[in-house]
Image: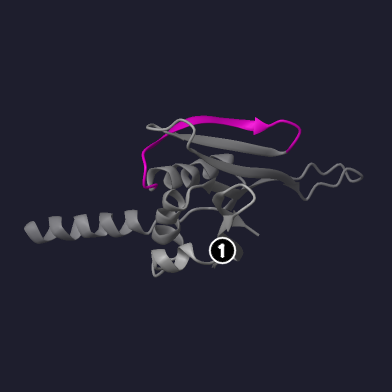
Amino acid sequence: MKTKLTLLFLVIALTCSAQKFKFVSDNPKDMRPIADSIALNAKRTFKFSIEKPVQGMLMTKILYTNISDPKDIIYILYSMEIVGENKALEIKGTPVYTFRSATGKFLDLFPFWKKFINPNLNIVTASDQTNEAIVDGKRLIFRDEPNISKWEISIH
């Protein structure tokens, strides 16, 4: 019995650690787990603030605020586009949602990158260079954005 319980816990643990995110999906609800995981794995403690459309764009932003410093924000952005639409043929097309970026401090974004994208990456090496990975055929980049003094995980 003890062996069966141990095996059950091992299977559950491996399943939970092997979480796979959909960076591109036909369901907008697939974007929130990525955003939540970035915030939950951050060095500091963040709370969900808001999820709302970006005015004038087919984008949605999700914000998480550091509970100790409300000016410290993790900013997540995802887009929606209609694929397969043909107005002349009166084909409506299908909405497709794509994770676009997460912006925040290096030490808050790095844990997500290390845990889910590149587990072999050294923290010092990561902080000194642009880091890239291919996930589901999409190129993900983790880099310093000097124009905004933040780090960014983005899809290309």
The answer to whether one can see residue 139 in this image is: yes
Assign the C terminus to one quadrant of the image.
Answer: bottom right
Q: Is residue 43 magenta-colored?
A: yes
- Residue in the picture at 47% in, 44% down: 33
Total numbered labels? 1
Q: The residue tagged with tag 1: helix, strand or loop?
A: loop
**Which quadrant of the figure has residue 88?**
top right
- Residue in the picture at 56% in, 42% down: 76
Q: Amino acid at mark 1?
A: Asp
Q: Residues within 10 Å of mark 1 (few under 14, many from 20)?
A: few
- Residue in the picture at 44% in, 42% down: 36
- In front: 117, or 126? 126
98 vs 65: above or below? below
Residue 23 as seen in the image, left or right of residue 92: left
How far across and down, in percent of the image, does residue 30 sit? 53, 44
Residue 79 as seen in the image, left or right of residue 10: right
For the view shown, which residue lies furthest in the right direction?
88
- In front: 138, or 43? 43
69 vs 133: above or below? above
Residue 59 as seen in the image, left or right of residue 130: right
Q: Is residue 128 magenta-colored?
A: no
- Residue in the picture at 72% in, 30% down: 55
How far across and down, in percent of the image, does residue 13 sit? 27, 56
- In front: 118, or 150? 150
The answer to whether one can see residue 133 in this image is: no
Question: Circle 1 is placed at which residue position?
Answer: 136
Residue 91 as seen in the image, left or right of residue 12: right
How far across and down, in percent of the image, does residue 85 sit? 81, 46
- In front: 104, or 9? 104
| Highlighted range, magenta | 42-57
